[in-house]
Image (cartoon, rainbow, N blue to C red):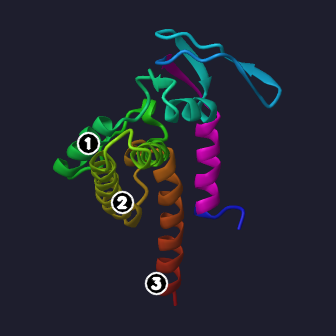
Amino acid sequence: MVNSIKNKLLREENDYLHQKIDTICLKELKYFQHLGRKIGPFKVGHPYTLDNYIARILIEEGFLRYDDGNHITPKTIQKINFRESTNRELGNIPKSHKHVYIQAHQELKLLNSLSEKGKKSQRDFKQLHSDVNDLIRVRLAKIIRLAIQTQNIQSKKTLTTEELILFEELSRRIKDWRDYLGSV
């Protein structure tokens, strides 16, 4: 279905992958062609702004690293996770982390790939995987409570784009369920 939660999330992921991100060059690289476009050359220590899907490949190969304060790192996930697990209310994830789950998922895929190549430890991947799943579990419980309640506009502002997709679907389904069972 075109408007399924999965398809909405895939559209958000596509939006994220085509965003421009800031990087720093770690290893020199001559230019290369990608879809008829010249990319590079890259000089060590210089900053570059690239489409995320291109930068990700170069980061995985060790030529670049993220230099974007808006990019989710394992430490960022741990901080958000700690804040969420110690607070009963739904915390506000900064708008700079608009796609927190998509970025976390991409970071997981990157760490998994690097650990399979022996460039990062498997322990780092497992820790991030655990932190991401804890964050999903904690925020999901709060989103479900919010969806059950009446529409609270202020609380909706604390949701990320991915969470808003889920919240709207849950709210609609809960309302339909209540209306059907509560009607005579």
Q: Residue at x 56, y 29 (%)?
A: 58
Q: Give the residue at mark 3.
A: 182
Amino acid type, callout 2? Leu
Between marks 1 and 3, how big is the CA–CA gap?
A: 42 Å
| Residue 23 falls within the magenta-colored stretch | yes
Q: Where in the figure is residue 139, as x and y percent of width and height? A: 33, 55
Q: Residue at x 34, y 49 (%)?
A: 125
Q: Where in the figure is residue 62, as x and y percent of width and height? A: 48, 29
Q: Is residue 173 left or right of residue 54?
A: left
| Residue 20 falls within the magenta-colored stretch | yes
Q: Magenta segment, which residues? A: 6-24
Q: Give the residue at mark 2.
A: 140
Q: Which of disc 1 and disc 2 is earlier in sequence?
A: 1
Q: Which mark is residue 78?
A: 1
Amino acid type, callout 1? Gln
Q: Where in the figure is residue 144, as x and y percent of width and height? A: 37, 64
Amino acid type, callout 3? Gly
